[in-house]
Amino acid sequence: MSSAGQISLKELIEYLARALVDQPDEVHVSEISGEQTVVLELRVAKEDLGKVIGKQGRTVKAMRSLLSAASAKLRKRAELEILE
């Protein structure tokens, strides 16, 4: 955890993804930081891909909304990519 009890963007996505999937040990998030932008790459087990994306992409859209709100507080722009 970051200082003052704050959670990082990477930890946020990792936490959300682990709560959704059947194989939480297969959840891996890598962070690529630029000056103004952070790209988070999420990998899950192949069987759990549908759970993370959700019907019509609703789940991943919700995760991206949370990420956007959290990153706005840090005055950065964050993107979430789901890798197969």
Image (spheres, rainbow, N blue to C red):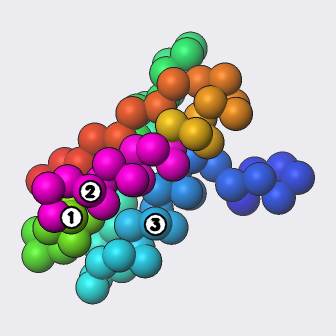
State yes or no: residue 59 in magenta. Answer: yes
Task: For label 3, count other residues whose C-alpha is less than 10 Å away and answer few (under 14), some (14-19) or many (20+).
Answer: few
Residue placed at 69% from the left, 31% from the top?
Answer: 74
- Magenta residues: mostly which secondary structure? helix
Q: Quadrant of residue 20?
A: bottom left
**Is residue 71 shown above or below 47?**
above
Relative to 10, is 53 on the left or the right? left
Residue placed at 39% from the left, 53% from the top?
Answer: 62
Q: Nearer the viewer, residue 80 or 84?
A: 80
Residue 6 drawn at (x, y percent): 77, 53
* Chain-order first, disc 3 or disc 2: 3
Relative to 63, is 83 on the left or the right? left
Discs 2, 1 touching: Cβ within 8 Å: yes
Residue 25 drawn at (x, y percent): 35, 78
Q: Quadrant of the N terminus?
A: bottom right
Amino acid type, mark 3: Leu
| Residue that carries the numbered disc 3 in the rendered image | 16
Residue placed at 59% from the left, 24% from the top?
Answer: 76
Residue placed at 29% from the left, 73% from the top?
Answer: 26
Q: Which mark is residue 54?
A: 1
Residue 49 drawn at (x, y percent): 16, 65
Cα distance between the residues tagged 3 and 2: 14 Å
Amino acid type, mark 1: Gly
